[in-house]
Amino acid sequence: MKIIKHWQGLDPKDRGASVAMGNFDGVHLGHRSVIEVAAAQGPLGVLTFEPHPREFFAPDAPPFRLMNAEARANRLAKLGVQTLFELPFGVEMASLSPDEFAQQVLAEGLGIAHVTVGSDFCFGKGRKGTIDDLQQLGTRYGFGVTIAPLMRAGGKEISSTAIRNALSEGRPRDAATMLGHLHRIEGEVIHGEKRGRELGFPTANMSVAGLHLPRLGVYAVKVDVLTGPDTGSYGGAASLGVRPMFGENTPNLETYLFDFKGDLYGQHLSVALVDYLRPELKFDGLPALIAQMDSDCSRARAVLAAA
């Protein structure tokens, strides 16, 4: 998949795509339906924005994203997207009226042939552009427009908000039903305090900065090592939290990979939350902590074996 991070001066061969347009946070089943409709119209592209517009307009709001840009790109590539237009969202983009966006970005900049959006899509300065406006502007500037219906699951609309709620309540399986895949946290393995190694459970530490936090606690996980000499898939147990045993308060993700002996520092991992095992606890001492970690790993292995 080719990633293009600008909309001016495009190479002619990158123009003429059929794009699914939106933020695609989580790339859930509703997003996938929009992408599938777009795929029927021509060479498949996705048009999205980085950072997410909500991050631009409310930089001090609590983190809400289900996935970072890297994870979103990886998921879109798996869906057969040929070109990802990951356009910078800043003062210039935010100031464009619906008409200016359609003309300058979609028609003149990207030269799109067709655009597909969900029926709740809004665009342009102040989110004043509606799907009716987009269809009229498509006629004016020479690109087709298709409106994809919203998807529902269990009688309820699938949305990133509903998925965030499920994760916040420790229901990763319900989130996966709406996502169409397990919720994953992706990123680089960073150096931590190396306490897990000292306890006999060496963990891969990853930052969760900027992401919506699922319920803190211990999870059974599936792990894909994406880079380095140990690429592959592994089972594991992961602790998402602030490590109350050691008086820390910055959340991170610590993942213990079963039957793994390599060095993962600097490599990129994709950690999928399969099932919630227990909340974060504070123990009276290290022996109690180690005993609980043994129990957690046994439970995680059983969950993964049955998955």
Image (cartoon, rainbow, N blue to C red):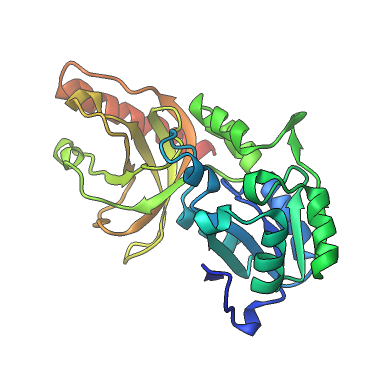
Q: Residue 224: percent from the left, percent from the top?
A: 43, 54
Q: Residue at x 36, y 57 (%)?
A: 268
Above or below 84: residue 167: above
Q: Which residue is drawn at 27% across and 33% down?
A: 250
Q: Residue 279: percent from the left, percent from the top?
A: 38, 22
- Is 196 left, or right, of 146 in this rendering? left
- Is 30 left, or right, of 258 in this rendering? right
Q: Quadrant of the N terminus?
A: bottom right
- Report the residue that reaches farthest toward the top: 284
Q: Residue at x 78, y 55 (%)?
A: 134
Judge whether residue 28 can be spotted in this image. no
Judge whether residue 269 can be spotted in this image. yes
- Is 24 left, or right, of 129 in this rendering? left
Quadrant in the picture for residue 151 = top right
Of 53 and 128, nearer the camera is 128
The tally of labels here is 0
Q: Residue 18: percent from the left, percent from the top?
A: 73, 68
Above or below 284: residue 298: below
Of 305 and 61, nearer the camera is 61
Quadrant in the picture for residue 79 = bottom right
Q: Quadrant of the C terminus?
A: top right
Of 212 and 9, nearer the camera is 9
- Report the residue that reaches farthest toward the bottom: 12
Above or below 172: residue 181: below
- Is 51 left, or right, of 40 in this rendering? left
Q: Residue at x 73, y 58 (%)?
A: 99
